[in-house]
């Protein structure tokens, strides 16, 4: 599995507890296992305890991710109504319309997230690539599965999952008996987070509104609702 994607999070009490829960989550039977939901809940509590994550400022930990969600929402709605070529042209990337999907995805993620060594930027790019892959899989599927709000909800849940994996990866990898168990454990974590995003706020932004205040407020509310599911916010 390797530990290249893991990082050592802070060592406060809440973080030590979260790492312990992550270890028990993937430990062999008999080691007092816990459910995926508890891993996420303890992780959100740890985020809330440290850095800019104290109290209501927890959302500040995801500023870059929320901004990327606005771009993704606008792209998704444009692609749903006018096709991928038009959506790419809006970002002056129309030359990539006939390129392999990987090239278009790379072009968009580079346009939306600054290339930096920051953790949040890394998480945003990874989750964006996963979400955009759904758009470029099939033009005919866009109108049914890949509109802006649906993409944003999925992306925000994916981003939080990617962040968890990076922060608790060392504990998760060390406890897993093997690669199949590790992958299955990550899939359960992702499922918990995706389930928390299925009831979005009403009145999502329309095409042309995503990059303004309406888009910022809606994406923030989606993320806030996901976090509240795990008692990350009061």
Image: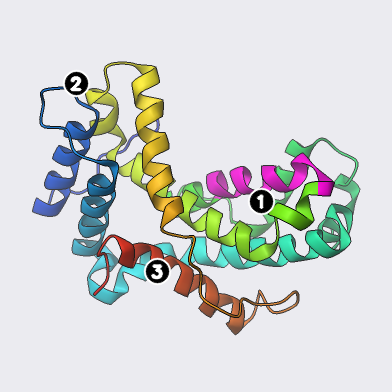
Mark sitting on residue 110? 1
The reply to whether callout 1 and callout 2 are in contact (CB within 8 Å) is no
Say which element carries label 2.
loop
Of callouts 1 and 3, which one flags the residue occurring earlier in the amino acid sequence?
A: 1
Tell me if residue 187 comes above or below residue 129 in the rendering.
above
Residue 76 horizontal/vertical position (percent): 72, 60
Q: Do the residues labelled 2 and 3 touch (CB within 8 Å)?
A: no
The stretch drawn in magenta includes residue 135? yes
Which residue is drawn at the image coordinates 79% and 60% (left, top)? 80
Give the residue at mark 3: 225
- Rounded to the nearest angstrom, the CA distance separating label 1 from label 3 is 28 Å
The vertical placement of 170 against 64, above or below, is above
The crowd level at tag 2 (other Cα within 10 Å; few <14, some 14-19, many 20+) is some
- Residue closest to the eye, 224 or 196: 196
Residue tagged 2? 28
Asked where in the image residue 78 lies, by quadrant, the reply is: bottom right
Q: In this view, does 5 lie to the left or right of 41?
A: right
Residue 129 placement (x, y as % from top left): 62, 44
Comparing 216 with 30, the one in front is 30
Q: Which of marks 1 and 2 is nearer the N terminus?
A: 2
Task: Return the x and y of residue 155 as percentages of the image width and height.
Answer: 54, 54
Q: Residue at x 86, y 38 (%)?
A: 99
Q: Name the secondary structure under disc 3.
A: helix
Q: Give the range drawn in magenta.
A: 125-140
């Amino acid at each position: 599995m390797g530990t290249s994607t893991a990082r050592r999070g802070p060592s406060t009490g809440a973080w030590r507890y979260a790492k312990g829960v992550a270890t028990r989550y993937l430990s062999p039977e008999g080691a007092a296992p816990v459910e995926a939901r508890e891993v996420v809940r303890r992780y959100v509590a740890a985020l809330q305890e440290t850095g800019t994550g104290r109290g209501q400022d927890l959302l500040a930990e995801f500023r870059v991710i929320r901004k990327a969600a606005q771009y993704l929402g606008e792209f998704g709605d444009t692609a749903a109504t006018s096709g991928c070529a038009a959506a790419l042209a809006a970002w002056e990337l129309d030359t990539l319309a006939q390129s392999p999907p990987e090239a278009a995805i790379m072009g968009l993620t580079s346009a939306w997230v600054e290339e930096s060594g920051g953790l949040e930027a890394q998480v945003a790019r990874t989750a964006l690539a996963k979400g955009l892959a759904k758009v470029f899989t099939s033009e005919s599927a866009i109108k049914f599965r890949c509109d802006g709000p649906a993409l944003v909800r999925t992306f925000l849940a994916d981003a939080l999952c990617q962040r968890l994996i990076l922060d608790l990866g060392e504990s998760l990898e060390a406890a897993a008996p093997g690669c199949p168990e590790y992958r299955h454990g990550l899939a359960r974590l992702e499922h918990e987070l995706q389930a928390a995003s299925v009831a979005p706020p009403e009145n999502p932004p329309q095409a042309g509104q995503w990059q303004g205040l309406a888009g910022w407020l809606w994406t923030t509310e989606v993320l806030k609702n996901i976090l509240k599911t795990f008692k990350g916010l009061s």
